[in-house]
Image (spheres, rainbow, N blue to C red):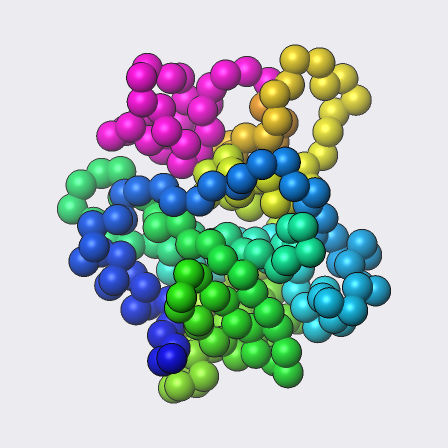
Amino acid sequence: MQNYPFQHWVLAAALSLVACGTGYDSGGTETIDNTPSAVGSDPEVGTEAAALMGSYQATEGTLLGLVLAKKDGNRVFVADQQVMCFKAPCMPVHLSGTWSALDGTLRLTESANKHLYEYTLGQGTLTLVDPTNHKKVGALGEVQTWCGESAHCDLQQVAQPRSNSGAGGVVCRADRTCGVRSGEAAGYGDSCEGGLACLDGLSCQSGVCAP
């Protein structure tokens, strides 16, 4: 199967008019652990993949964020790709699937499509390169958490305050970091249909909480 860089995903997403949709479902209450210290000795993960596991936010390029995690024994990823659209809010396209890393190559598998990238990780920056033309796709810095919608936070370690009474899970905040939910307000990228309020710094735009 032919592999395509993220830029091709942008065109495909725009043509299919999914640029303003949300598509990732966290699914159930599976055990999540994406800390290298917890998976470094797991032979199914391997040393190279264990070093990559974590959260990343764009410093360059249209891939806005990426989470490489492990869920119920499977390596899973979520990401957001910025697209061009004709109606605000121009929300990114959510991508999700499985991933693997071997010999400096990162493979992201979304549904039936597999995408290969040469990568380097150094000084807190993940650099992705299209192996077909050796051009940089983007650069992402390591961060504690990153999210494109609240479901993404289910894959990450979110610090819990000492007093956590009344909290109801995790939520994607306006700065696209994960936090503990303390009310019913919807987070960044979440649906706000039916009059549901959005978190501070966000407003309901075309049925989605956006800046």
Q: Which secondary structure is most common in the magenta stretch?
A: loop
For residue 139, above or below residue 94: below
- Residue in the image at 50% along x and 53% along y: 78
Q: Quarter holding the C terminus?
A: top left
Q: How many marks?
A: 0
Q: Please state the horizontal and vertical placement of residue 106, each as a whole percent of the image.
A: 55, 73
In the image, residue 112 lies in the stretch drawn in magenta: no
Residue lying at the far bottom of the rendered structure: 133
Which image quadrant for residue 2? bottom left
Q: Quarter holding the N terminus?
A: bottom left
- Residue in the image at 38% along x and 17% along y: 196
- Residue in the image at 65% along x and 41% along y: 30
Please give the range of residues in magenta: 182-211
Q: Please state the horizontal and vertical placement of residue 167, each as a whole percent of the image.
A: 64, 18
Q: Please state the horizontal and vertical placement of residue 18, each as a whole percent of the image.
A: 26, 49
The reply to whether residue 104 is visible in this rendering is yes
Closer to us: 141 or 171: 171
Left or right, residue 70 beside residue 24: right
Residue lying at the far left of the rendered structure: 86
For residue 96, above or below residue 24: below
- Residue in the image at 32% along x and 15% along y: 195
Q: Please state the horizontal and vertical placement of residue 179, each as a whole percent of the image.
A: 61, 31
The reply to whether residue 51 is visible in this rendering is no
